[in-house]
Image (tube, rainbow, N blue to C red):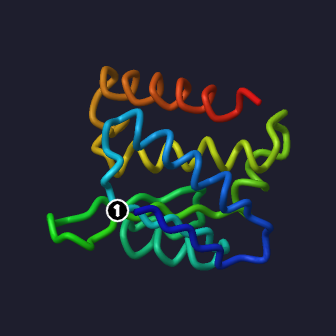
């Protein structure tokens, strides 16, 4: 199950982001994963970033793996469109594409990938991230 929640004033194409999540989960052979995706404002993501990462600043994406195998437990990916838009003003990608890129990044984290462990793990994760991104934006 994939749940998409928009808690911001930004327009979010839920069907598009649901499709992005499904492609990543299918590609990782994890279609039965329960994932909640939330779009929040800068204040909320800053609060979460401070609470869980001890960084008192907004960020683009936070990921939380599920901690047990309870049937209905969800992994969570939290995105901040406001921060992503601000951070990518000089990018040639649209906000929607940049949010898709960050969603893919967050999903890979909840599936066990971590670019902060080693250079090898970083390369493995970012190669997958780029490959999934190219699949979802090939339109």
Q: Is residue 19 left or right of residue 97?
A: left
Residue at (64%, 46%) from the top-left corner? 100
Q: Is residue 26 left or right of residue 104?
A: left
**Residue 79: x and y, percent?**
58, 61
Decide: is 10 above or below 26.
below
The part of the image, by quadrant, that contains residue 73 is: bottom left
Residue at (66%, 62%) from the top-left corner? 14
Residue at (62%, 53%) from the top-left corner? 17
Residue at (40%, 62%) from the top-left corner? 35
Q: Is residue 132 left or right of residue 34?
A: right
The part of the image, by quadrant, that contains residue 74 is: bottom left
Task: Work out whether residue 9 or residue 21 is closer to the camera in this orientation and state it.
Answer: 21
Q: Is residue 127 left or right of residue 115?
A: right
**Residue 71: x and y, percent?**
20, 70
Q: Which residue is mark 1?
A: 34
Decide: is 65 above or below 50.
above
**Residue 134: x and y, percent?**
63, 26
Task: Work out whether residue 25 or residue 117 is closer to the camera in this orientation and state it.
Answer: 25
């Amino acid at each position: 199950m994939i749940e998409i929640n928009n808690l911001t004033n930004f327009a979010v194409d839920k069907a598009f982001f649901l499709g992005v999540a499904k492609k990543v989960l299918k590609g990782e052979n994890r279609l039965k994963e329960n994932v909640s995706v939330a779009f929040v404002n800068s204040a909320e993501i800053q609060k979460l970033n401070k609470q869980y990462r001890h960084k008192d600043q907004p960020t683009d994406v936070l990921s939380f793996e599920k901690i047990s195998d309870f049937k209905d437990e969800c992994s969570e990916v939290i995105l901040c469109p406001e921060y992503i838009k601000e951070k990518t003003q000089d990018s040639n990608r649209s906000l929607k594409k940049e949010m898709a890129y960050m969603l893919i990044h967050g999903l890979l984290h909840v599936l066990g990938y971590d670019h902060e462990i080693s250079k090898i793990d970083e390369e493995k994760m970012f190669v997958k991230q780029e490959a999934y991104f190219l699949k979802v934006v090939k339109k």
